[in-house]
Amino acid sequence: MRTANIIDHFGSMPDPREDNRRHKLIEILFIVICAAVCGAETWNDIEAFGKATESWLRKYLELPHGATRGKRVGLQGGANACTAAGG
């Protein structure tokens, strides 16, 4: 059985957000998943993870606007991504 990486697995998921997207949905999901695996429990934890690991994240993500802010992820990415995934 082949295991897909995060980007392969979620990359084709439709983005339900409005046109005011600053960050790619796949990049938000990647950061949120990695942060959660590392123990993040709040949007502020996710923001801190993104800032602390931005150089590492850039190995896998474009991040044209830098790592996203936690509140932006929570309001724009997190809730909508869960809805799109059926959560």
Image (cartoon, rainbow, N blue to C red):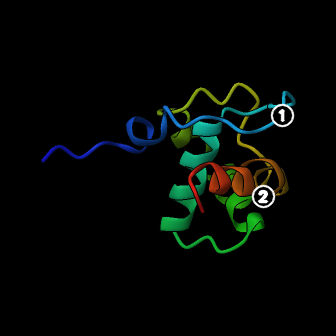
Which of the two residues, 19 or 74, is positioned nearer the viewer here? Answer: 19
Q: Which amino acid does label 2 sit on?
A: Gly
Q: Residues within 10 Å of mark 1 (few under 14, many from 20)?
A: few
The residue depicted at 23 percent of the width and 46 percent of the height is 3
Q: Mark 1 points at which residue?
A: 18
Q: Is residue 22 left or right of residue 60?
A: right
Residue 5 seen in this snapshot = yes
Up-down relation of residue 11 to residue 44 (above or below)? above
The residue depicted at 57 percent of the width and 38 percent of the height is 26
Residue 53 seen in this snapshot = no
| Residue 48 percent across, percent down from the top left | 71, 60
Q: Is residue 84 left or right of residue 16?
A: left
Up-down relation of residue 8 to residue 75 (above or below)? above
The residue depicted at 84 percent of the width and 27 percent of the height is 19
Q: Is residue 39 left or right of residue 4?
A: right
Q: Mark 2: which secondary structure?
A: helix
Q: What residue type is labelled 1?
A: Glu
- Quarter of the picture containing the C terminus is bottom right
Q: Residues within 10 Å of mark 2 (few under 14, many from 20)?
A: some
**Which of the labelled discs sits on residue 74, or is there none?**
2
Q: In this view, does 37 lie to the left or right of 40?
A: left
Q: Mark 1: which secondary structure?
A: loop
Which of the two residues, 24 or 70, is positioned nearer the viewer here? Answer: 24
